[in-house]
């Protein structure tokens, strides 16, 4: 009998292992980030073509600012270049690009390239690509608490209004819960990625390093998801 395919609505990817991918080839870590960015482009095309609606990726955590200045600068330059040069692709694919994270410590040119990409793609409906940049899951919750407190003081909401669905609307973006989270490179940790949205997600850990995590590897992960989902399907 043919396997029934159950697609996740929102998937998250912790893109880990770029540095090791490069080091193993005798290359600089930056070459790994470039290979990761190239892989991400192919992977996104594949994922949205399958009909998945929401994709969130962990591009840069708040903790990543503790890396060497050279690597942080390289990544920031890569982001600026990627957001402007891939603009056409997101428009052609009709994908809405949004960002989650704190704007503090980000360079002006990075913030400008983010704002431009968001503006240029804001009306697209085929899929949503959420990029977590300068992101921390605990910080997102702390920021939400501050915003809620402000709205209480401004009489926009009352304490009695606070429940899980209201709190969800105070996250950086109003996104559906994550169904499936993939982490590459063998680390079995969540590392502060979308804690609120991932509470009920299925998690998948693979030794494959992110630049090698291609369409075939993704399909393998998806098959695992469909099996897990089917096992618990009756209780949803
Ligand atoms: C983790 O690998 C990866 C990052 C900190 C950066 C992720 C960025 C990309 C894939 C670049 C493209 C992204 C966008 C949105 C353009 P690591 O460096 O921690 O690898 P390691 O654990 O092997 O050192």
Image (tube, rainbow, N blue to C red):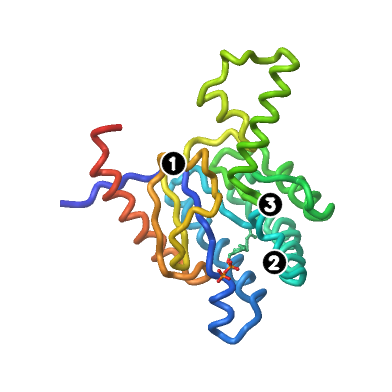
Residue at disc 3, CB closer than 8 Å to ligand 1: no
User: Residue at label 3?
Assistant: 134
Is there CB contact under 8 Å for labels 2 and 1?
A: no
Q: Is residue 56 left or right of residue 157?
A: left
Whichever of callouts 2 and 1 sits on the residue coming sooner in the sequence is 1
Q: Residue at x 59, y 33 (%)?
A: 174
Q: Label 2, on which residue?
A: 67
Q: Is mark 2 within 8 Å of ligand 1?
A: yes
User: Which mark is nearer the camera, 2 or 1?
Assistant: 2
Please tell me in which quarter of the rendered image ligand 1 is found: bottom right
- Label 2 – label 1 distance at C-alpha: 33 Å
Could you tell me which residue is drawn at 26 percent across and 33 percent down? Answer: 235
Label 1 beta carbon within 8 A of ligand 1: no
Pair 2/3: label in front: 2
The answer, for residue 68, to whether it is visible in the render is yes
Q: CA distance from mark 1 to mark 3?
A: 24 Å
From the viewer's perspective, tell me whether residue 111 is left or right of residue 25.
Answer: right
Q: Is residue 17 above or below residue 26?
A: above
Q: Position of residue 104 (x, y in %)?
A: 78, 47
Residue at 55% across / 85% down in the picture?
A: 25
Q: Which residue is mark 1?
A: 9
Q: Is residue 69 above or below residue 170?
A: below
């Amino acid at each position: 009998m043919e396997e029934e395919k159950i697609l996740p609505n929102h998937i998250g990817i912790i893109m880990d292992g770029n540095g090791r991918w490069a080091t193993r080839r005798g290359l600089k870590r930056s070459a790994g980030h470039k290979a990761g960015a190239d892989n991400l482009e192919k992977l996104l095309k594949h994922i949205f073509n399958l009909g998945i609606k929401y994709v969130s990726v962990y591009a840069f955590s708040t903790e990543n600012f503790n890396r060497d200045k050279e690597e942080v600068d390289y990544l920031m330059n890569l982001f600026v270049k990627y957001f402007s040069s891939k603009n056409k692709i997101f428009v052609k694919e009709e994908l809405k690009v949004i960002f989650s994270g704190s704007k503090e410590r980000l360079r002006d040119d990075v913030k400008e390239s983010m704002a431009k990409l968001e503006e240029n793609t804001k009306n697209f409906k085929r899929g949503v690509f959420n990029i977590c940049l300068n992101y921390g899951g605990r910080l997102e919750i702390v920021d939400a608490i501050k915003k809620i407190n402000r709205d209480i003081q401004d009489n926009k909401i009352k304490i009695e209004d606070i429940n899980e669905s209201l709190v969800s609307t105070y996250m950086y973006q109003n996104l559906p819960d994550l169904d499936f989270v993939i982490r590459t490179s063998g680390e079995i940790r969540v590392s502060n990625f979308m804690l609120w949205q991932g509470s009920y997600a299925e998690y998948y850990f693979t030794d494959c390093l992110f630049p090698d995590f291609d369409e075939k590897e993704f399909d393998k992960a998806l098959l695992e998801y469909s099996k897990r989902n089917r096992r618990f399907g009756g209780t949803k």
